Image: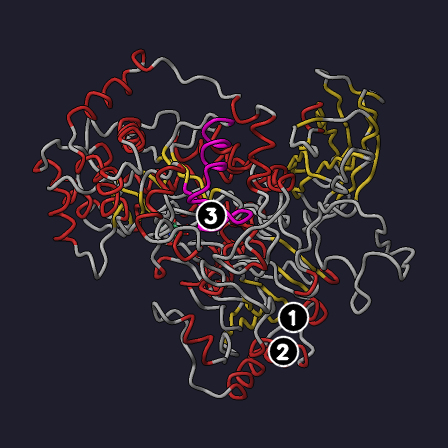
Amino acid sequence: MSNAPRLTALMLGLGLAIGATLAPAQDADPARAYVDALLAKMTLEEKIGQLNLVSVGPDYPKEAIMADIRAGKVGAMFNTVTRPDIRQMQDQVVHSRLKIPLFYAYDVIHGMRTIFPINLGLASTWNLDAIATSGRISAIEAAADGLDLTFSPTVDVTREPRWGRASETFGEDTWLTSRIGATLVHAYQGNDLRAPDSLMASIKHFGGYGAVEAGRDYSNVDMSPQRLMQDYLPPYRAAAEAGAGAVMVALNSINGVPATANRWLLQDLLRKDWNYQGLLISDHGAINELVLHGVAKDTRDAAEQALKAGVELNMHDDVYGKQLPALLAAGKVTQAEIDQAVRDMLLTKYRLGLFDDPYRRLQGQDPVDTNAESRLHRAEARQVARESLVLLKNEKAVLPLRKGATLAVVGPLADSPRDVMGNWSAAGVAAQAVSIRRGLENAVAGQGKVLYAKGANLLDDRDVLAYLNSYEPAVAVDPRSAGEMIAEAVAAARQAEVVVAVVGESQGMAHEASSRARISVPDTQRELIKALKATGKPLVLVLMNGRPLALEWEQEQANALLEAWFPGTEGGNAVADVLFGDQNPSGKLTMTFPREVGQVPLYYNHLSSGRPFDAAKPNKYTSRYFDIVNGPLYPFGYGLSYTTFDVSAPQLSSATLKQGDTLTARVTVKNTGDRAGATVVQLYLHDVTASLARPVKELKGFQKVMLQPGESRELDFPITEADLRFYNNDLKLVSEPGEFKVMVGLDSERVREGSFTLL
Ligand code: NOJ
């Protein structure tokens, strides 16, 4: 039996589901008054039309959509992204009976025209201001193209490097993802959703999508209610409470109940317990998929279940349009249920200011050139990208490089502007993106020399290539033999002082529907690395990838490793800034890098166990693998700098903490090296004894500080009782008196401790 009924029963039994604040009196709210008056004028067909979210496709051409808009059968559009196209669609509305404007949505995930680093890279900045900058510029650019809503932020927590969509997440930590999610909601939406440069946020994928089994996309989630509530759901709540206008419902089931039909998830938790009032959007085709999940006997049943669960706007397949009239006639759904969904849709349009002005985000002249250079925000993209890079290894200070040097820049990803942008790169134009090769050439211009050779194809498995190229010619294959390509790269390496090899994954390898069973650098590229290493030249590997890779072998070969993720439009320049030391790297990982895929899931905040492995005193009968070095290759929170830092043990303001009080952990961080640099001081807590096994540590604070050589600074981290709460066995959010450890460090492994008692 699935856990869902038990969870529902527990929550209802505890009154958690009914603790909602009451909505404001309806007649006191002008939005509701407006929408209810409009609703009263609508026919059933017009109402159901509002629930239809469509996009242009081979089966549904533009003309057919325009006719449907005139007939009042469309509520909103996605994937129409230029002003002329959006205007043309909106112009159809005046020919409809009630002239209800459409809104326009798009996956603006890490930039619209200017592409910022992928989300995993954004998170690695540990800089909420930088992340806010990326969100604000995304909104400005998307709204300038006429868009109203983005299907973002993705606040799925994930511990699954096999999952291609890890790239779209902010990593494995619940608390950090919550903060980033809320930051982005504010950044997209601004202070006023009606402002012409505000973009409504639709958080996704509710809920728990990041925990799909074995990282296989679209598979299911089966986990304890405690883990779900404690680790996976809080970021959706944080982003909802930050005011996100919409929520996209996930494709997966949770403990057997698909999210799209999950009344506990959507009604008891989201609507009642969290008092969420925004719009609930289905994911692409998700309502129909209830049949394949095996919980609906046919499409009609699926529509009934989705509507009753609370799914309002139907993405892509118009199941509601086809099924709701008959379901209503048969008494399977009620008019009130349909009206509620339509009301939320109309309220969304009201909040966006579209009833006042359907062309709110289409003011002024259309740009002569949609892709004009002047519409980009390159300086901001470069600055954010510089902070997203994570230095994983730097043996004998091989980095930073000299600009006067001759460099051999090689690898299948070295000169690939398309890959630099990463997946979900919205309206980004590859020709405007700076490849790593170009970035290095820009940096050394007039001083050093850059020799380029591709060196290897991305991979050589024909089936995998066909998969990656199935929708677009994404991966170009060089027809030369592997031997010829390697020989060319080796010749370049021999003439150079240092070799920079750009290796990893193409953007399409870390995307939706891009799960990998092998999380390694493909063999063609490993052969290249082997040959480069054999030249004896210093070898710098710049990694492009959208997930943690198993890099033990690469770490042995390389003198330096720089994790560049997919760094966006200005990626090449940002990588050059770091390689040449114009920017001292400060990024830190937000997902654990395992040594081997067999360790997955491997994450820093695992529960305490009865026989923990201790590397200092290795014991056979402990929780370990006997055939590899245990533990991660690079832990959560890890990242090097060109300088060094030291953090003191935390000094606590008191040995005890009472309800309502704040305790302060004070540490001194010092730049002990000879360069200015920034680092991220991280605070973790551990509940030593509790009614449930608790994580060995949990991130509860961080501060990013910039320090001059020799400079030190005192940092205060406040700790309150709320930081100590967890969902107990009755699914009550509680803190339990007793001892807590406080750990502070520059990553999640090397920490210094203190402790206090919660009274
Ligand atoms: C399906 C994806 O799961 C979702 O993240 C995305 O927003 C929609 N497609 C629309 O493109």
Quarter of the image holding residue 281?
top left
Up-down: is 389 above or below 700? below
Query: Magenta span covers which residues?
Result: 248-273
Residue 273: x percent and y percent?
Answer: 51, 27
Is residue 254 rendered magenta in the image? yes
Q: Is residue 683 left or right of residue 130?
A: right
Q: Residue at left 73%, top 31%? A: 713
Q: Is residue 201 visible?
A: no
Residue 731: x percent and y percent?
Answer: 65, 32
State the residue position of label 2: 532
In the foreground, 376 or 442:
376
State the residue position of label 1: 539
Q: Residue at left 35%, top 71%? A: 473
Q: Residue furthest left?
A: 95
The amino acid pointed to by label 1 is: Leu
Viewer-side label of 3, 1: 3
Q: Is residue 299 left or right of residue 378?
A: left
Quarter of the image holding residue 214?
bottom right
Which quarter of the image is occupied by the C terminus? Answer: top right
Circle number at residue 258: 3
Q: Residue at left 7%, top 38%? A: 95
Any atom of ligand 1 within 8 Å of the CB at mark 3?
Answer: no
Q: Is residue 173 left or right of residue 358?
A: right
